[in-house]
Amino acid sequence: MSSILRRCTKLTHSGILSMLPGSNGRSCALQYFASEKRYSTSSKIKVDLDSNTGVAIMQFQSPPVNSLSLDFLTEFAINIEKLELDRSCRGVIITSALPKVFSAGLDILEMYQKSPEHYVEFWKAVQEAWFKLYGSSKVTIAAINGNSPAGGCLLAMCCDYRIMAENPRYSIGLNETQLGIVAPFWFKDTMQNVVGHRETEKGLQLGKLYTAPEALKVGLVDELVPEEKVVSSAAEAMSKWLAIPDHARQLSKSMMRKPTIDRLLAAREADITNFVSFTSKDSIQKSLGMYMEMLKKRRS
Ligand SMILES: CCCCC/C=C\C/C=C\CCC/C=C/C(=O)SCCNC(=O)CCNC(=O)[C@H](O)C(C)(C)COP(=O)(O)OP(=O)(O)OC[C@H]1O[C@@H](n2cnc3c(N)ncnc32)[C@H](O)[C@@H]1OP(=O)(O)O
């Protein structure tokens, strides 16, 4: 897998930087995309591209909670890159094939009791996934059909538009401080670009998980719809975004996102070093261990 990652990280950021100067809801998604063809099959992510509309639907299918492991992130980056290079694809809808969860965020086990070399490899994969999605020239829409904490929220925030199931038991947010860890600056930048400085400051300090209605209120998501309509609503929204000429929309997207992307590009190595030294601290390892225990106890 590390060789796949190396191949993947060698790919250029061919997104905007280089190109421009289970439930009813889930079966409904498949019905909606009746003319779609299987585009890619990998163990954790399924991608179907509708050749008529140019819209790809990417479904996370990594039980139990679509956590963002090294393997998952590697597959994700490869899939987004493939779609980026495919001129027949104009938009991507990202959703989950699992019940109740969009993504549980970064796989905590990848950050717990592993070697510094592993932390380096893992963090490169996190960065790469963000570069690919945040820098994508395609229209990207998150169809958030379940809980979406931390890294799951990051993926959703990287998209151009977010539609969430109106179930008040689902939540989304950057809850890192609740784990005793700190969201890196580019997670913060991404959130700030969506909801503004003040809400990001509150959200980050409190590690706030916003219920779906709260997320709508602060603009963390753009629409709430019944769960079974999340993907079909995403497709409707997509058609509005695709009505705009690609070239003009892509330049506008680039103009808005390039400074944020450049900031991490300039600090990429330092960010990896920070992550490794932060994660390797005994106190952080202890916090992560306690958090995992808490998750297990909550279950039993
Ligand atoms: C100034 C200096 C700054 C320096 C900064 C430098 C670097 C920054 C350093 C670190 C930054 C790291 C950023 C981290 C980002 C993250 O994404 S951390 C992950 C946060 N995620 C969570 O908190 C979610 C935890 N999970 C849940 O809340 C729930 O699981 C759920 C998603 C709501 C789903 O609930 P439910 O359906 O009830 O499922 P269970 O809770 O029963 O879980 C099933 C099994 O899955 C395991 N699991 C859950 N989440 C994760 C995860 N994220 N990673 C790994 N494993 C996970 C859970 O333990 C269960 O396992 P068992 O079946 O019991 O074995």
Image: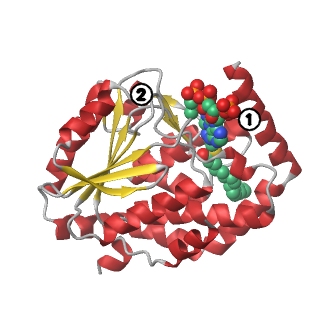
Mark 2 or mark 1: which is in front?
1
- Decide which of tag 2 and tag 1 comes sooner along the chain: 2
Mark 2 neighbour class, 10 Å CA radius: few under 14, some 14 to 19, many 20 or more: many
Vertical placement of residue 180 versus 263, above or below:
above
Q: Measured from the top left, where is residue 93 in percent x and y? A: 31, 48
Residue holding disc 1: 292
- 232 with respect to 174 (left or right): left
Q: Whole-percent x and y of residue 122?
A: 65, 61
Residue type indicated by callout 2: Ala
Residue underneath mark 2: 212
Taking the image as shown, residue 91 lies to the left or right of residue 206, namely left
Quadrant of the image for the C terminus? top right
Residue that protrudes farthest toward the top in the picture: 300
Quarter of the image containing the N terminus? bottom right
Q: In the image, residue 9 lies at what x, y percent? A: 54, 73
3 or 207, nearer to the observer: 3
Query: CB at mark 2 closer than 8 A to ligand 1?
Result: no
